[in-house]
Each structure stands twice: as structure tokens, then as C-alpha cells.
Amino acid sequence: MKLFELLCVQFIAFLSLFFLSAFSVTHSASISDLLITEVMANPLAVSDARGEWLELFNPTQQSINLSGAVLSDSGSGEHIIPGDTSIVIDPGDYFVLARNGDTAINGGVVADYVYGSDFSLSNSSDEIIFSNGSNELLRLDYGPGFAPSGFSMELINAVMLPGNYAASSSQYGLGDWGSPGSAGSFNFNSITPVPVPGAALLMSSGLIGLVGLGRQRKFRF
């Protein structure tokens, strides 16, 4: 093998390892990668204090830990998820956070986590904010008309804006409309994210092709 070719191979190997390492570190899944896929702010079968809930979905290929996160709005509502317990949302899973976890009195919602009375959802306008205490990681703002009585609002595509939510067409529990903990109008499990290492390998493959093309041009007579 010529010296130039040997140096090219070594250089590409180094770049491949570099990009694989860099992508795996800097692109680790976090709370900011989650989607707020469903919001029940105005239950009808039970009171708001018992029946409010929201749903998260993990669209990544990595587990995401909610431990230590702060759930809040722009006002006084704030709940700190304990940092001493592992509260994990696995890849492709829906995760329900509810104001009350007793299915006998909350309208039939099976909750994965209960935030209690520290945080509530307004029927008119409000914010759902997840942060690490100092920096916002995930946020949804909604205004008047977003919370019809007895219906949850489901995200119908992967863009988390109030206009991309629609009233649920499924019933649960005591008769309110929603699909807590499962796919609703839009099945987010149908979205298959590209693995991060695969993206890095594609990048390194592209570099190999570019170097090869450069060699062809250099040695063409």
C-alpha cells in the first residue's frame, strides 16, 4: 500500500472514531427530546383536582430519566420530581403524569407518576414546563379553547404547537375522552428515529468517498 493510501486510511479511521464518540456524547437523549403528546386539563367525569393528567412520549432510542426534573408553569405551580428515585421513560413508551393516582376517584386514569396538588392545569390558558431548575428543557403553552370539557387534547403530529393538538376520539374510565398511556389519533410508535451511531457512520462514509474522489482526481492523467 502506498504511503498516501495508508495515511488516508488511518485518517479516516481516526475521524470515524472521533465522530462516533462525539455524537454518542453530545446527542444523549434528554427530557428536551420528549413530546407532550396529550393533555387533560378539563375533565368532566370527575373534578379537575382529581382528574387532570398529561402524557409524555419518548421518540428516541434511549431511556430518559425524569428524576430531579421540575414540572411547573409560569406562575406558582411547581412540582419537583424526586432525584433519589429512578423515574425512566423507555424508548417508544408513553408515560402518564397525573394529579391523582387513585383510579377509583380520578376517572379511571392509570398513572405512571403522581405530581399531586403542587401543579395544576388551567381550563383557559396555561404552561407546561419541564426544567432542571434553571434551564427550560420542554415546554407547551396553550390558550383559550384548548381544553374542552371532558376531552383531552392529543398531539396529531410531531410538532408540539397548540394548533397541532385535537380533541381525543377515544373514551376511557368513567366516560371522559382520551387515551392516557397509549397511542391516540397519531401513533408516535410509527416514527422510527435514525440511530445516532448510524448517522456518524454515514458521515465517516461520506468522508471516505470524498477522499477517494480526491485521490482519483489527483492521480488522473
Image (cartoon, rainbow, N blue to C red):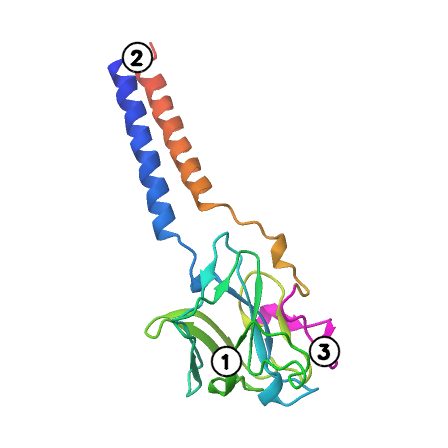
Q: Amino acid at mark 2?
A: Met
Please report the residue visible at 28 percent of the width from the left and 19 percent of the height from the top.
6
Q: Amino acid at mark 1?
A: Tyr
The C terminus - image quarter: top left
- Looking at the rendering, the stretch of residues picked out in magenta corresponds to 163-182
Secondary element at tag 3: loop
Please report the residue visible at 34 percent of the width from the left and 25 percent of the height from the top.
211
| Residue corresponding to mark 2 | 1
| Residue corresponding to mark 3 | 173
Residue 1 magenta: no
Residue 162 position in % (x across, y down): 56, 73
Secondary element at tag 1: loop
Q: CA distance from mark 3 to mark 1?
A: 20 Å
Whether tag 3 and tag 1 are in contact, CB under 8 A, the answer is no
Residue 39 position in % (x across, y down): 59, 75
Q: Quadrant of residue 19?
A: top left
The crowd level at tag 3 (other Cα within 10 Å; few <14, some 14-19, many 20+) is some
